Structure formats: C-alpha cells, structure tokens
C-alpha cells in the first residue's frame, strides 16, 4: 500500500509517499522505523481513511493511510 | 454570499498569505444580512519568533516565513465536523468562514482567518474561540519555519 507522508516525516523519507507491505498498524510502524531515517525519535499520528487511529488494527491494504507529524495550523 | 445559513462543504485552503483586503471584503459581503448584529474575527499572523540554538546552531535566528502544507482531504473533513459542532452549539450563528494558508507566508502576513456572524455578540465570540482552538488541534496542517539563515525547523502547536 502507498502511505502518505507529511511535514518532517516526508522530508526525512525524501518523498511524499512510501510503498509499504503491512497487515497491521504495528507492522506498518516497524516498517517505517526501518525505512525512514530517525523515524523512531519522531512523534506522529496514524490516520486511516482520514481519521486518527490510536490503537493497533488490521489493515486490508485498501485503506488510505497517512503518517502525520505534530500539527502546526493557525 | 449565500443568504441561507451556511453549512457549505468547501476547501478552506488559500495559496499564500490572506490579504487584509480579503478580510474587509468578507465583512462587506455581509451588509445585506440585516439579521446580523455582530461579527467576530480571529486572524492568525506569522510571528517572527527567535529560534535559539535549534539544530545545534549557537546563534539566534528568527523566523522569516512559514511554509504550510496540509493533508487537505482530512483537514477539510475535520473542518466540516468542527463547523457542524459549532452550528449545533451556537444556533444564533448565521455564518462561519474559515480560511487557512498553504504555501509560503512571510512574517507579518496573515495565515488564518475565522469569521463568525450572529444576531448577538456572545454567540459569535464563543464560536470563534471554539473553532480557532479546534482547527489548531484537529486539522493536519504542517508548518516549516524558514529561518533568517535559510535553514528551517518544523513548527508544532503546543
């Protein structure tokens, strides 16, 4: 699945999206730590279909997944 | 400007700074709504914060601009939810307009506008305070603070 990246995380990854194979959010997070430099030290929220998700869950691969660093609007 | 109560779904993002003239024009558009007795407006302006020793730099630099990016689809969906909460909570509110910049906004320029109108001031005031806070908390908007030495740091709301 293509995972959307924003802000400092997109900067670290050098891309606005990353292709990841993961069957759960936990697996996705592990994959991001492996693939994106300094990811472990960054705080972020996972959004599934544009809703923030704070617990692990199964991913079917059809969802719109985004990794959101701290918000800075306003 | 619609003459009905506004629950319109739309994109809140504008490219670059919000011109002060846009604020005046927004007020002017409500002249035909003679049921309105109060407008309340919050304007966010980019502040030239001093950044001391960020990223191990020993010198003091200042913020010269913020480059905003957003997860637009999610931000607009969150805005619809916030708008509906506000209209439910302050039923005397007749209009609510929210705009946020994306792209580069220089220090001293406007990046955020929340504009509510109501028959009386209390509802407009409370709604603007609520919507402003919720936008800052809930909308996935990201800010790259571009510093006077051309480096940058990533802003985060407290």
Image (cartoon, rainbow, N blue to C red):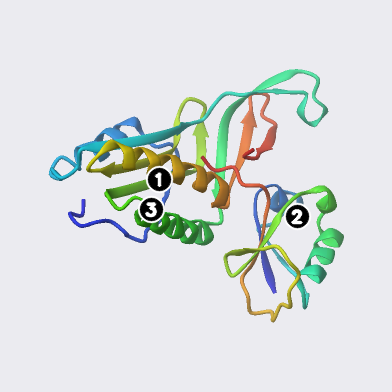
Q: Chain of mark 1?
A: B
- What chain is tagged by disc 2? A
The quadrant of the rendering that contains the C terminus of chain B is top right
Q: Secondary structure at mark 3?
A: helix
Mark 2 crowd level (few <14, some 14–19, many ≥20, 10 Å Cα): some
| Residue B125 pos. (x, y %) | 36, 37
Residue B22 makes an appearance in the image? no
Asked whether, in this view, residue A33 is left or right of residue B80, the answer is right
Spot occupied by residue A63 in the image (x, y as percentages of width and height):
63, 75
Residue at mark 2 to residue at mark 1: CA–CA distance: 29 Å
Mark 3 vs mark 1, CA separation in Å:
21 Å
What residue sits right under mark 3 in the picture?
Answer: B89
Q: Nearer the viewer, residue B134 or A58?
A: B134
> What residue is shown with label 1?
B99
Determine which quarter of the picture holds residue A17: bottom right
SS assignment at label 2? helix
How many other residues sit within 10 Å of disc 1, few (<14), some (14-19) or many (≥20)? some
Q: Earlier along the polypeptide chain: callout 3 or callout 1?
A: 3
The residue singled out by tag 2 in the image is A13
Left of A74 or right of it: where is B1?
left
What percent of the width, then of the height, locates residue B135? 50, 47
Residue at 78% across, 49% down: A42
């Amino acid at each position: 699945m293509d995972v959307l990246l924003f802000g400092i995380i997109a900067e670290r990854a050098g891309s606005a999206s990353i292709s990841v194979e993961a069957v759960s959010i936990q697996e996705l997070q592990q994959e991001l730590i492996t693939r994106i430099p300094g990811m472990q030290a960054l705080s972020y929220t996972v959004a599934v279909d544009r809703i923030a998700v704070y617990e692990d869950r199964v991913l079917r691969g059809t969802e719109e997944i985004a990794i959101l660093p701290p918000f800075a609007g306003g | 400007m619609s003459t009905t109560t506004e629950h319109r779904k739309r994109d809140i993002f504008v490219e670059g700074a919000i011109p002060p003239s846009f604020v005046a024009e927004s007020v002017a558009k409500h002249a035909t709504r003679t049921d309105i007795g109060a407008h309340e407006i919050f304007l966010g302006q980019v502040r030239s914060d001093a950044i001391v020793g960020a990223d191990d730099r020993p010198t003091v630099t200042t913020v010269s601009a913020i480059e905003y990016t957003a997860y637009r689809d999610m931000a607009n969906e969150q805005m619809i939810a916030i708008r509906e909460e506000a209209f439910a909570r302050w039923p005397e509110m007749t209009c609510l307009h929210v705009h946020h910049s994306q792209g580069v906004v220089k220090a001293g320029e406007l990046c955020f506008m929340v504009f509510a109108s109501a028959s009386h001031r209390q509802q407009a005031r409370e709604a603007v305070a609520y919507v402003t806070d919720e936008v800052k908390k809930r909308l996935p908007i990201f800010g790259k603070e571009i510093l006077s030495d051309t480096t940058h740091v990533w802003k985060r709301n407290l």
